[in-house]
Image (spheres, rainbow, N blue to C red):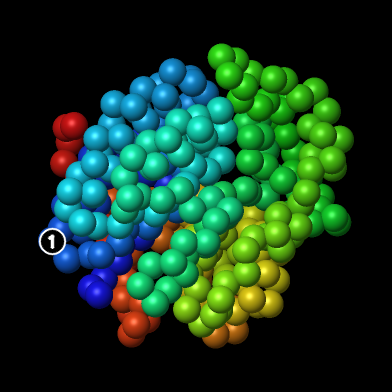
Amino acid sequence: MGPFLYVTDLHGDRRKYERTLSLAVETGAWLVLNGGDMFPHGRMQEDQGEFLREFLDPHFARYQEAGIRYFGFPANDDLRVHDPLFDEICSRYPLVENIAGRKVAAGPYEFLGFNLVTDFPFRLKDRARMDDGAFAFPAQFGTGVLSRPGGWEEIPDWKAYARTLPTIEEELAALPPPGDPSRAVYVIHGPPAGLELDVVRGGQRVGSPATARFIRTVRPRLTLHGHIHESPDESGVWMGRLGETVCIQPGQSASGLSVVVGELEEMRFDRRILPVGCNG
Ligand SMILES: [Zn+2]
């Protein structure tokens, strides 16, 4: 069935979207997986909505025309207020799926997506959760905010609010179970703890212990992560194993497109950094 491509944290970079599509065509890929943080940076609601309508919608149409499947989801920098629009756009293209919290069968495999993240210092809390019941919150940059239609809801006491939400551990446990874990591929935006896939600038490890435990328990074929763009540069590691499960976090490069070309049958993976040119 040919290779698949995995990209993550494109943050609205149109050149990286274009390069991903051209690489998919060049390599004969049957599927592109996007690990989230798909829309432009920033807290301007209009910018992200415009990107969805003006770029992502026609971009997905090109995947549909090319006969290439595209599975992705919005993650922590993609405002939750745009989830209905993202779903609406995906629903126009039979080959395009929002896999957040869902299980989608494709060929002999099942793909499951998870777009909530372990809490961080940043103020936008649309998809932030305590990792587990014993979670120690990191220092915060300010009060929390949630995206709401037309504006923002400020959350003055974020920690108290977060304690009312299910944890990452509980949210992962609520995912639909795979039919056959050895044929299941999970796209989980945040990296697991303990594999050096979670190293931020300066060396701190911020990965999710609950995600690592979940992977060890479910034992899927493959897990794909993102979220910490700089981690592979900091640790020198982009692939690891938890038990038999291969875990990949290719990061995202400031200088080019970070992309993994993978083969699921043979379990071969190649991480590339491709130039993307300077305009577009
Ligand atoms: Zn992220």
Q: Position of residue 275 (x, y in %)?
A: 19, 50
What residue sits 41% from the left and 61% below the top?
Answer: 250
Relative depth, front residue between 62 and 243: 62
Q: Is residue 159 above or below residue 227?
A: above
Taking the image as shown, residue 117 lies to the left or right of residue 270, namely: right
The quarter of the picture where the N terminus appears is: bottom left
What residue sits 85% from the left and 55% below the top?
Answer: 133
Query: Hey, what amino acid is under mark 1?
Result: Glu
In terms of secondary structure, where does tag 1 sit?
helix
Q: Is residue 194 above or below residue 147?
A: below
Q: Which residue is mark 1?
A: 26
> Is residue 43 in sight in this rendering?
yes
Q: Position of residue 247 (x, y in %)?
A: 50, 71
What residue sits 42% from the left and 73% below the top?
Answer: 109
What residue sits 31% from the left and 76% below the top?
Answer: 263
Q: Which residue extends farthest top?
A: 150
Taking the image as shown, residue 278 lies to the left or right of residue 221, namely: left
Taking the image as shown, residue 49 lies to the left or right of residue 272, namely: right
The quarter of the picture where the C terminus appears is: top left
Q: Position of residue 47 (x, y in %)?
A: 40, 21
Relative depth, front residue between 144 and 35: 35
Q: Position of residue 36 (x, y in %)?
A: 46, 47
Q: Quadrant of residue 254?
A: top left
